[in-house]
Amino acid sequence: MTVPPDAVAVELEVPFHDVDAVRIVWHGHYLKYFEIGRTALMRARRLDVEDVIGLGFRQLVIESHVRHSFPLYYGDRFQVHARVADVSHKIRVDLVVWNLTHQKRSAKGSTTLVTTDAAGRLLMETPDALRARLLP
């Protein structure tokens, strides 16, 4: 699978501590893989946690979705692709976990974040300072 031009890709290997007795990744770990991809995307856009705080904002994950399609097994190599899908009122990051070993998509989904000010008050729109870094 080719990485979309506006996406960030992170390559990983399934560690033993992420699998169950039959060496399949436990479904909850996909959210961890999504977080690794989302973090890489935000860092690439100069919006890591300290950057966001430095701009006077905070971000909170309010929703996550995962659709599983093919398992990851112990030792499989995989990529997490993350791309910004929406920045209007909330920030939605679309994610794909691609099993490189078996050349199949293992999961797809999204995480949605909202932005608050430094005092924790919800902002109804993504601030321009964040939007400018998120959009290519």
Image (tube, helix red, strand yellow):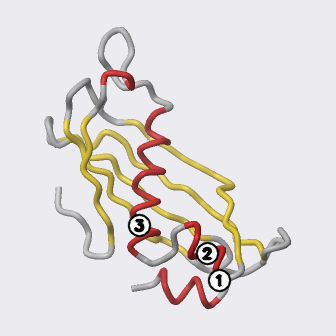
Tell me the distance, in whole angstroms, between the alpha carbons under discs 3 and 1.
18 Å
Under mark 1, the amino acid is Leu
The earlier-in-sequence mark between 3 and 1 is: 3
Q: Secondary structure at mark 1?
A: loop
Q: As drawn, is 59 to the left or to the right of 83?
A: right
Badge 3 crowding class, 10 Å Cα cut-off, few under 14, some 14 to 19, many 20 or more, is many
Badge 2 crowding class, 10 Å Cα cut-off, few under 14, some 14 to 19, many 20 or more, is some
Q: As drawn, is 124 to the left or to the right of 1?
A: right
Tell me the distance, in whole angstroms, between the alpha carbons under discs 1 and 2.
5 Å
Q: Secondary structure at mark 2?
A: helix
Nearer to the camera, 68 or 114: 114
Q: Which residue is mark 1?
A: 55
Q: Which residue is mark 3?
A: 41
User: Which residue lies at the image location 16% right of the left edge and 43% below the top edge?
Assistant: 100
Against 25, residue 4 (above or below) is below
Could you tell me residue 134's position as x and y percent? 48, 80
Q: Which residue is mark 2?
A: 52
| Marks 1 & 2, CB-CB < 8 Å contact | yes
Foreground label between 3 and 2: 2
Against 57, residue 10 (above or below) is above
Q: As drawn, is 51 to the left or to the right of 45?
A: right
Under mark 2, the amino acid is Val
Tell me the distance, in whole angstroms, between the alpha carbons under discs 3 and 2.
13 Å
